[in-house]
Amino acid sequence: MCGDVTITISVFVVDKNGTLLQLTNTDQLYFTPISGYLVLRRSLSLLLTKAARVITKKYQREFIPLGITVPQATVLGALFAKSPMTQSIIGTINLMDKATLSTAIRQLRDKKLIETTGLAHDARFALHTLTAIGNTRAEQIVQIENKVKVELEQMASPEIIEQVHAYLAAILQAEREDLD
């Protein structure tokens, strides 16, 4: 009996945290050794997603004592740089989706870290500013951002960091142009 035979090969990789990962599309795998484990070279989006999670966790750990989340810190940081601002401008500057931004603003208002003036019921026209307590939190956020930035910058040379930054900025710019 002659016919097609399908052979399924499963490839597993253990990352440095001991997590067992099953890889798909193993017919086109290209591996790159990074820090003691293998990463798919073609899986840039997976690598970026994982890196974003790691960075977000670093910030989350630092923001817990302040009683704020990463999205809330992002809003406070924007208002610390320039205030007052509308929700729309804050979202554009920080590349935040409307749902996350609305939730963060509502929570910050409930915590008395920001004030809303104008038409609070219409986010397009409401202006948000820091309260005195919010300003103090924003100053603490700047210190935390500097600390985490130093930690992250120690992982690569300034040239590589600049190249990654330029590449990611180009991706975001292309997305903006596609939306226009």
Image (tube, helix red, strand yellow):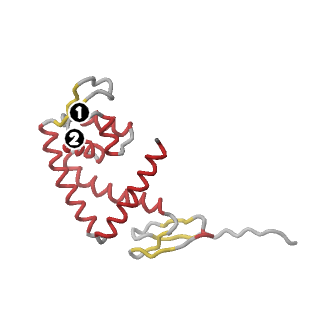
Q: Which amino acid does label 2 sit on?
A: Leu
Q: Residue at x 20, y 58 (%)?
A: 146
Estimate the x, y position of residue 54 in percent, counting from the top left.
35, 59
Name the residue located 46 percent from the left edge and 41 percent from the top edge.
180
Does residue 54 appear left or right of residue 42 in this picture?
left
Q: Pick the residue in front: 64 or 74.
A: 74
Q: Where is residue 12 in the image (x, y as percent from the top left)?
A: 54, 70
Quarter that holds the N terminus: bottom right
- Give the residue type that dot 1 points to: His
Please give the name of the residue rendered at 24% of the width and 36% of the height, measured from the top-left corner. Answer: 108
How many marks are shown on the rendered structure?
2
* Residue matched to label 2: 79
Circle 1 residue: 128
Q: Where is residue 100 in the image (x, y as percent from the top left)?
A: 36, 40
Q: Which comes sooner in the sequence, label 1 or label 2?
A: 2
Instruction: Report which quarter residue 11 is drawn in.
Output: bottom right
SS under mark 1: strand
Q: In this view, does 127 lie above or below 65?
A: above
C-alpha span from label 1 to label 2: 8 Å
Q: Which residue lies furthest to the right in this view?
A: 1
Q: How crowded is mark 1: few (under 14 residues within 10 Å), some or many (20 or more)?
A: many
Specify whether 103 is left or right of 50. left
Local secondary structure at mark 2: helix
Please tell me how crowded label 2 is: few (under 14), some (14-19), or many (20+) other residues with Cα within 10 Å.
many
* Contact, mark 1 vs mark 2 (Cβ under 8 Å): yes
User: Residue 129, percent across and down?
Assistant: 19, 34
